[in-house]
Image: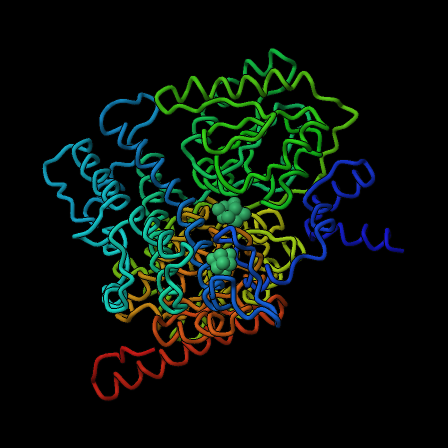
Amino acid sequence: MAEKKKEKDRNRTIDPAALEVLAKTEGSGVETAYDRYLNMQPQCNYGNAGICCTICIQGPCRITKKASKGICGAAGYTIVARNLVRSVLGGTSAHSDHGLHTTLALSAVAEGHVKDYGITDPEKLKRVAERMEISTEGRSDQEILKDLVDLALEDFSRINGKYSAWLEKTVVPERIEKFIECNIMPYSIHRTIAESMAQTHMGMDADPVNLVFQALKAALCDYTGMHIATDLSDILFGPPSPSASEANMGVLEENMVNIALHGHNPILSEMVVKAAREMQDEAKAVGAEGIKCMGICCTGNEVLMRQGVAPLTNFLSQELAIMTGAVDAMVVDVQCIMPGIQSVAECYHTKIITTIPNAKIPSSYYIDFDEKRAMEKAKEIVRVAIENFKERDPSKVHIPQVKNKLIAGFSLEAFEELLASVNPDEPYKVITDAVEQGELEGLVLFAGCNNLKVPHDESHYTIAVELAKNNILPVATGCAAGTYAKLGLLNSDAVEKYAGEGLKAFINRLNEANKEKLKGEKLPLIFHMGSCVDNTRAYDLMTALARQWKVDTPKVPYAASAPEAMSEKAVSIGSWCVALGMPVHVGVVPPIPGSPLVDGIALQIAQDVYGGYFMWEEDPKEASRKLLEAIRERTWKLRVHKMAAEKYETELSATW
Ligand code: BF8
Ligand code: SF4
């Protein structure tokens, strides 16, 4: 009986390809996250509630009925708030290290030190430079780039004097006033990380409100690092534009060398895709029909958006991809790479290739990726995969025949272009009008990971479909977008199937106006805006709507949802979304409710101060209802305030 239950519980996914691999390998002894999750039960309730402190080695200190304070006297609210700050710092560090890596690559381009990378989109360079108030008149791209890179580097390292430039120049001015007033406007990323680590050391800040505000300040640095990463990647590789592809494990090819690209930064993956395209003949020489690259996690999103490379799977099923027996190499760089992939790979022929000095896995194949010799290194990586194709064991190959068509590549530029075909003078008015007239209820950004605490992909899927039925315009990033790609929500069939009448009419109007641009394709139900760092694209859309309405962002009917949040990065993104004025649903309760005070700040008080707030809700139906309610409240208020402003000929009320 217990074994039966375990078997059933092991299948915690709604992805048919993942289910097929799990069924096929049942009892094979290959262990994955789905097994390890069960072995981990029951999980510690103190940890779940956030009231366990290991900040000094007198700990762990847990808040219990018997012990209401830690050994040093720290109360539950201090412990929860301190853990929250450190969690945000993990996310901020990860995203900004990615952003710094991109900045340094562009710095090498500006100095003329690399031959394999260059400025792919000088127009984007100029647009970003102008936004950052760097002069472009009569200057060469190289000169402009140099100033832009210097400014980005300052945003990482400035000690004081000026505030974070990327934050100041990308959000509405009302937000900056608010951040200065609340003393959370950062000078720079590295300074804020250091001061926050100091603030959370044993015997430092014990004030939960002060700590939560610091968490928001650190989260604003997360936003800064991500925005830099997105802007500079676009200059390097070009901003994404709509292109068709397909997703899920059926994209593996039995007769080709299959290379899975996993991780986050396009600096590595763009070069591997390019190298693979040039090396098709080498693959044929070993008996393969060619080479196929495919993506996992956010690297998957990056190469899908710019190169149309097919997504293989998302975070939770990364090990299952190897268990198809058809992946010749999995090339990884940074973040969200389960160490478990190496043990799984050892049961098959797959080579795990790690590439970055601070993200190594014991026993993996390590190739140090050096931007100065990027193409040479990328070719070395592809060659390992080609050689390894010969080692494939046909008796272990089982590719689930599951895949779905999709259209992705909606950078803000691409989205704006679609809107401009309807209204060239005021593109964003196409959305604000649709909301005012009741055609659309508002917008929701679906972001974030997978988390085994809820069934894989189920919450992403259920909430998006439910909200689309209710005429919410959905946009997506990260592994949420991965779910929609795999399960067939990024195509026009899904519009027919799931969109409410208003959303359908809105999308069809864009289809009509963009017939030529879309070359016979039709727009999808959900607009894929990119990887997790590209959540800044989705937020720029909110800023554009706020500017169109001439209001501060908390008035805009636009919410975020991370139905299956998992990583520290999800915590930092959620936190800046709140500070920047969004209602934010999280589908897995983070370790906060152990302190009702900190929980109350996140759920309620944040709204009074910043306009944004969190909602914890694990049940996807209930979450849909709460998100819809949050959006409807904003839309209703916006309409009332607008009517009042028109009637009394006053400015639109600034309150939310
Ligand atoms: O940065 S969504 S599981 S891959 S953390 Fe990781 Fe989460 Fe996926 Fe993208 Ni984002
Ligand atoms: Fe315990 Fe205080 Fe040390 Fe935390 S900092 S482990 S609460 S003694």
Q: Nearer the viewer, residue 442 or 202?
A: 202
In the rendered view, would you say 522 is above or below 654? above
Q: Is residue 272 left or right of residue 253?
A: left
Quadrant location of the N terminus? bottom right
Task: Find the residue positioned furthest to the top.
Answer: 285
| Nearer to me, 223 or 21 | 223
Q: Residue furthest right?
A: 1
373 vs 310: above or below: above
Q: Residue at x 33, y 68 (%)?
A: 553
* Residue 496: % across, % down: 58, 60
Q: Quadrant of residue 86?
A: bottom left
In the rendered image, is residue 620 in sight?
A: yes
Q: Residue furthest left?
A: 138
> Residue 416, located in which quarter of the rendered image?
bottom left
The scheme the figure's colours follow is rainbow
Residue at point 34% right, 56% down?
A: 220
In-front residue for pair 140/494: 140
Where, quadrant-wise, is the C terminus in this rendering? bottom left
Vertically, is 116 above or below 104?
A: above
Where is residue 403, by image quadrant?
top right
Describe residue 220's horizontal placement relative to residue 503 as left or right: left
The percent coordinates of residue 634 (x first, y second) are 41, 76
Expressed as whole percent of the image width and height from the top left, the position of residue 19 reads 74, 46
Q: Examine the rendering and report whether any part of residue 474 can be seen.
A: no
Q: Position of residue 161 (x, y in %)?
A: 16, 52
How many labels, in total?
0
